[in-house]
Amino acid sequence: AEAEDEEELGLKQSIDTHKARYKEKFNRLRELKAEIEQIQGIMEKQRTVLQKDFESWYNLMVRQYKQQLRGGPSASADPAPTLNPATHNSPAPPPAGGGGNGSGAGAGGGGAEQPAPVLTGNRDADADIAAFYKARQQLLDKPKQ
């Protein structure tokens, strides 16, 4: 009978230990969930800001491109904007495979020179930017074909 009491007491202590550990972990989980929700809220706000900034930048690039097509005065005087001068130290070359001689003096069906993309200095990001401009140009040229 005494051995059963000791065994029962040991099991009760084990249950109490596990219960305390469970409560600690549960409270930590609750704290982490609150932190995750806060971070998700911040990320959603930043995503919205990023989307809005990109749309503004893209619209500016489209306006500059259209000005270049029309031969507008600000096309040559107003270089493409940079987002962070520290990461954009050099002028951007046209994307690979763009063709043309860089003079912008193509005749008739050749189309106008597209605006130079703003590069970041990051090889992967720059490749993505060049691919974007190439795809964009293909879309702009599509009705002409």
Image: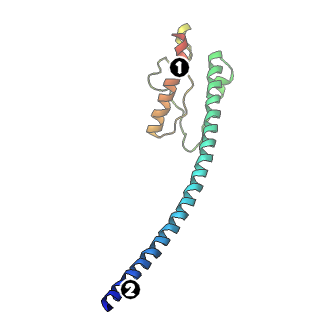
Q: CA distance from mark 2 to mark 1?
A: 77 Å
- Relative placement, left or right, of 104 versus 71 is left
Give x and y (percent) for residue 108: 56, 7
**Which of pointers 2 and 1 lies earlier in the amino acid sequence?**
2
Tell me which colouring the rendered structure shows: rainbow
- Residue at (56% x, 13% y) in the render: 105
The single residue placed furthest to the top in the displayed view is 108
Whether residues under marks 2 and 1 lie with C-beta atoms below 8 angstroms apart, the answer is: no
Q: Nearer the viewer, residue 46 or 18?
A: 18
Q: Circle 1 is placed at which residue position? A: 139
- Number of numbered callouts drawn: 2
- The kind of residue tagged 1 is Leu
The single residue placed furthest to the right in the displayed view is 73
Q: Nearer the viewer, residue 18 or 103?
A: 18
Quadrant hosting residue 83: top right
The single residue placed furthest to the front in the displayed view is 1
- The kind of residue tagged 2 is Leu
**Disc nearest the viewer among 2 and 1:** 2
Give x and y (percent) for residue 34: 57, 60
Can residue 46 be seen at all in this image of the molecule? yes
- Residue at (54% x, 30% y) in the render: 117
Q: Circle 2 is placed at which residue position? A: 9
**Crowdedness near tag 1: few (<14), some (14–19) or many (≥20) residues, C-alpha within 10 Å:** few
Quadrant hosting residue 51: top right
Residue 99 lies, with reference to residue 128, above or below; the image says: above
- Residue at (44% x, 38% y) in the render: 124
Which secondary structure lies at badge 2? helix
Which secondary structure lies at badge 1? helix
Can residue 102 be seen at all in this image of the molecule? no
Give x and y (percent) for residue 69: 62, 17
**Any mark on residue 39, and which?**
none
